[in-house]
Image (spheres, rainbow, N blue to C red):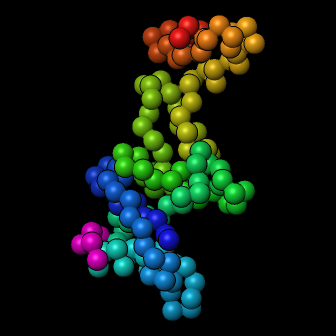
Amino acid sequence: MAHFAKIGMNGKVIGVHTVNNSDIFNADGVEDETVGQQYLEQHNNWPAEMWIQTSYNTSNGTHKDGGTPFRGNYACIGYTWDEDNNIFYGKKPYTSWVLNTTSATWHSPIGDAPDLTDEEEEADTIYQWNEDGQSWDLITL
């Protein structure tokens, strides 16, 4: 099965549809996104260019089976299609965070949270982003 994201206003994913592989092959028997787009337009009354193929096997810029990642992430409803960078990405978690277009993920402006020490893990604590202080704060659960 091939998967296609239905794109709405402002590049938002408003649906994800599956298409039989046989419906996306061109006359030469090669998988062709435009064939799938035309099929979806004909059967769903939505413009062909607003259907973008997505890979169920891609997440955070990595293919789960070691293959070539396709468009950053598998598209989900509410994700954004970034045509300029050819990726799908989720909602920005904090105002200050920046998009890494290689991994199609959001990151804090100061980097990842510190690793927990063994003692911190045993104390049932985690690092949580503090947007006001622009810091990773250690909190107890």
- The answer to whether residue 94 is left or right of residue 66 is left
- The answer to whether residue 109 is left or right of residue 96 is right
56, above or below 12, in the image: below
x and y percent of residue 57 in the render?
A: 59, 57
Q: How many marks?
A: 0
**Residue at image point 54% right, 60% down:** 55
Residue at the left extreme of this rendering? 45
Residue at the bottom extreme of this rendering? 27
**Residue at image point 54% right, 58% down:** 56
**Residue at image point 48% right, 45% down:** 89
Judge whether residue 84 can be spotted in this image: no
Residue 81 within the segment the image draws in magenta: no
**Residue at image point 35% right, 64% down:** 50
x and y percent of residue 110 in the render?
A: 61, 20
Residue 92 or 127: which is nearer the viewer? 127
Residue 28 quadrant: bottom right
74, above or below 97, in the image: below
Judge whether residue 97 can be spotted in this image: yes
x and y percent of residue 18 in the render?
A: 42, 67
Magenta extent: 43-47
x and y percent of residue 141 in the render?
A: 53, 11
> What is the magenta segment's predominant secondary structure?
loop
